[in-house]
Amino acid sequence: MRLDDVRTSSNVEDRRASGTGRARRGIALSGGTILLVGIYALVTKQNPLELLSALSQGTQPGSTPGAGSTPVDPNDPAAVFAKKILATTEDCWKTALPKLGAAYREPVLVLYRGSVESACGYQQAAVGPFYCPGDSKAYFDLDFLDDLQKQLGAGGDFASAYVIAHEIGHHVQRLLGTSARVQAAGRDEGAEGNSVRLELQADCYAGVWGSYAKARGLLEMGDIEEALRAAQAIGDDTLQRRGRGRVTPETFSHGTSAQREAWLKRGMESGDPQTCDTFRTARL
């Protein structure tokens, strides 16, 4: 991507210095979290039992409770990259969201490594990047994004940018009331349930941002292919096949590789968030 002339967003909290070495209360592990732990263990070549134990105890794997924080470099290329991508999402949605009848309120991006406290609870890197509607903040473990590129075949800066844009898509859903409606209706874990539709819509919204980035001349040759490969690499069926050798559609939460790629592509080709209504289509 061509980001030299792109501003950095000021809506950023850098918590990389405080992400490890703190003892926490234990937390309950859901089936979805356990699956994510297995995927993350595969990617990082860590012991999944150690990760699960650390999550249940609320400590960082391999760390000593009470250890001090480590200074971080504010000019770390990965952090600067994330801040610039956030800025482009802000510019994109200030224009795009009014098409859906709402004004855009900018979220906060929290950068961390290892673990982080949020309004949605204490989270380890195993959960991957996430958006917390409780505090309107998107959380990004930079180590996980590094592993996404190196281990899952989702290389390239635009692939990482897509992951960030996807989480900002969840913020858009919150502003529109979509997330609240899905939560009120009850979470359906089926292959084409509300959880999958919510995630695929966030992919489509990421595509809308991708269309904006392309129109601004920020993309280089091969960037779009990078994003599509990333969407394919993190489909539920691909991750399950890679992680445990079999696919169980009834446990899908984000959609298949083909679905994620298709909805990302739809947003990129249209540039219009009105084309992203995954809740009114019979077939995803």
Image (tube, rainbow, N blue to C red):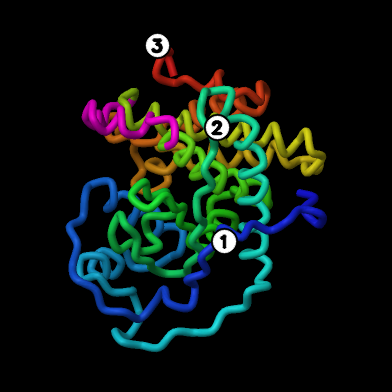
Give the magenta part as a residue range. 175-191
**Quadrant including the C terminus:** top left
- Left or right relative to 130: residue 54: left
- The answer, for residue 224, to whether it is visible in the render is yes
User: What residue is disc 3 on?
Assistant: 282
Q: Quadrant of residue 267?
A: top right
Residue closest to the eye, 195 or 14:
14
- Label drawn at residue 146: 1
**Circles 3 and 2 in contact, beta carbons < 8 Å:** no
User: What residue is disc 2 on?
Assistant: 205
- The residue depicted at 49 percent of the width and 84 percent of the height is 70
Where is residue 154 drawn, in percent x and y? 59, 48
Where is residue 92 drawn, in percent x and y? 65, 38
How many numbered marks, from 0 up? 3
Residue closest to the eye, 228 or 167:
167
Q: Distance of mark 2 from mark 1, alpha carbons?
A: 23 Å
- The answer, for residue 237, to whether it is visible in the render is no
Q: Earlier in the sequence, mark 1 or mark 3?
A: 1
- Left or right relative to 12: residue 279: left
- The residue depicted at 61 percent of the width and 57 percent of the height is 82
Where is residue 108 drawn, in percent x and y? 50, 55
- Left or right relative to 171: residue 63: left
Q: Amino acid at mark 3?
A: Ala
**Circles 1 and 3 in contact, beta carbons < 8 Å:** no
Q: Distance of mark 3 from mark 2, alpha carbons?
A: 19 Å
